[in-house]
Amino acid sequence: MNIKDIHISNRLQLFPHNKGWAIFDENTFRFSKEMRDFAAALNLAKTIAQKNEATLMVRDTEGEIILKTIYK
């Protein structure tokens, strides 16, 4: 996956997933990437959110928001 090809609307979420962590684009209602390593998934989600000037929300296993960052 090439970072420059990923375009999102305004909110991106990082969720726990059965394969590790999944990046969810609220605009398309799809998971765009699944990764086993949390640090790698968080770095990728931050990069995508920064590129698209979006809000990034990270959720824990209970669905609670543990991190929310707005990139403008």
Image (cartoon, grey):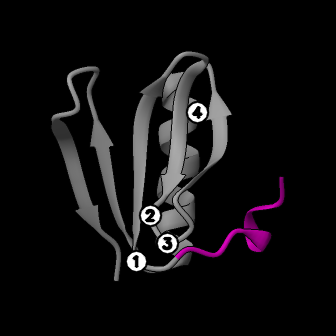
Q: Are marks 4 and 2 in contact (CB under 8 Å)?
A: no
| Secondary structure at numbered mark 2 | loop
Q: Residue at x 61, y 19 (%)?
A: 36
- Residue 27: mark in rendering: 3
Which label belongs to residue 40?
4
> Badge 1 is on which residue?
10
The numbered mark, 1 or 3, whose residue comes first in the sequence reads 1
The span from disc 3 to disc 4 (Cα, nearest Å) is 22 Å
Amino acid tagged 4 = Ala
Residue 48 versus residue 26: which sits nearer the camera? 26
- The x and y percentages for residue 39 are 50, 29
Q: Nearer the viewer, mark 1 or mark 2?
A: 2
Question: Are circles 1 and 2 on residues that touch, CB within 8 Å?
Answer: yes
Q: Is residue 42 left or right of residue 19?
A: left
Do residues under tags 3 and 4 come within 8 Å of each other at their CB atoms?
A: no
Residue 18 x/y as whole percent: 54, 16
In the displayed structure, would residue 68 be above or below residue 4? Answer: above
**From mark 1 to mark 3, how far is it between C-alphas?**
7 Å
Q: For the point 52% across and 78% down, which residue is it?
A: 52
- Three-letter amino acid code at the position of disc 1: Asn
Q: Which residues are magenta?
A: 1-8
Which numbered disc, 1 or 3, marks the residue closer to the eye?
A: 3
Q: Tell me, yes or no, whether the two marked residues, 1 and 3, touch with CB atoms within 8 Å.
A: yes
Q: Which residue is mark 2?
A: 26
Residue lying furthest right: 1
Q: Secondary structure at mark 3?
A: loop
Disc with the residue nearer the chain's start (4 vs 1): 1
